[in-house]
Image: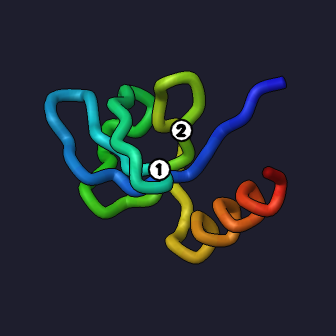
Amino acid sequence: MCLAVPGMLTAVDNGTGQVEINGLARSVSLLPLEDAAVGDYVIVHAGFAISRLSKSEAEETLEILKEMR
């Protein structure tokens, strides 16, 4: 089973970005979202930012994932 998680984009540099997910920074490819900007909330799957979502959608999804632990 695959899982994609939301995070906030904190840095962008030449096609890659840093995403904060639950306080941890991860490097991701921004190739699927070339116009992504710092502050965007994105869905991360297998090292790629694959789509954008709102802050409220990201927070709701993270809360659901916490409840699953």
- Residue 18 position within the rendered picture, expressed as x and y whole percent measured from the top left: 29, 40
Residue reaching furthest to the front: 69
Q: Residue at x 74, y 55 (%)?
A: 65
Give the vertical position of 2 relative to 62 (above or below). Answer: above
Q: Quadrant of residue 59?
A: bottom right
Q: Residue at x 47, y 37 (%)?
A: 49
Q: Residue at x 25, y 56 (%)?
A: 38
Label 1 belongs to which residue?
A: 21
Give the vertical position of 39 relative to 50 (above or below). Answer: below
Give the vertical position of 46 relative to 57 (above or below). Answer: above
Label 1: which secondary element? strand
The residue mark sitting in front, 2 or 1, is: 1
Residue toward you, 66 or 8: 66
Q: How many marks?
A: 2
Kind of residue indicated by mark 2: Val
Kind of residue indicated by mark 1: Ile
Q: Residue at x 45, y 31 (%)?
A: 32
Disc 2 packing (10 Å; few <14; some 14–19; many ≥20): many
Circle on res. 4: none
- Residue 14 position within the rendered picture, expressed as x and y whole percent measured from the top left: 16, 28
Disc 1 packing (10 Å; few <14; some 14–19; many ≥20): some
- Residue 13 position within the rendered picture, expressed as x and y whole percent measured from the top left: 15, 34
Residues at marks 2 and 1 touching, judged by CB atoms closer than 8 Å? yes
Q: Is residue 56 left or right of residue 23?
A: right
Label 2 belongs to which residue?
A: 44
- Residue 6 position within the rendered picture, expressed as x and y whole percent measured from the top left: 56, 52
Q: Is residue 36 left or right of residue 54?
A: left
Q: Is residue 35 left or right of residue 32?
A: left
How far separated are the C-alphas under marks 2 and 1?
9 Å
Marks 2 and 1, the one that precedes in the sequence: 1
Give the vertical position of 60 relative to 22 (above or below). Answer: below
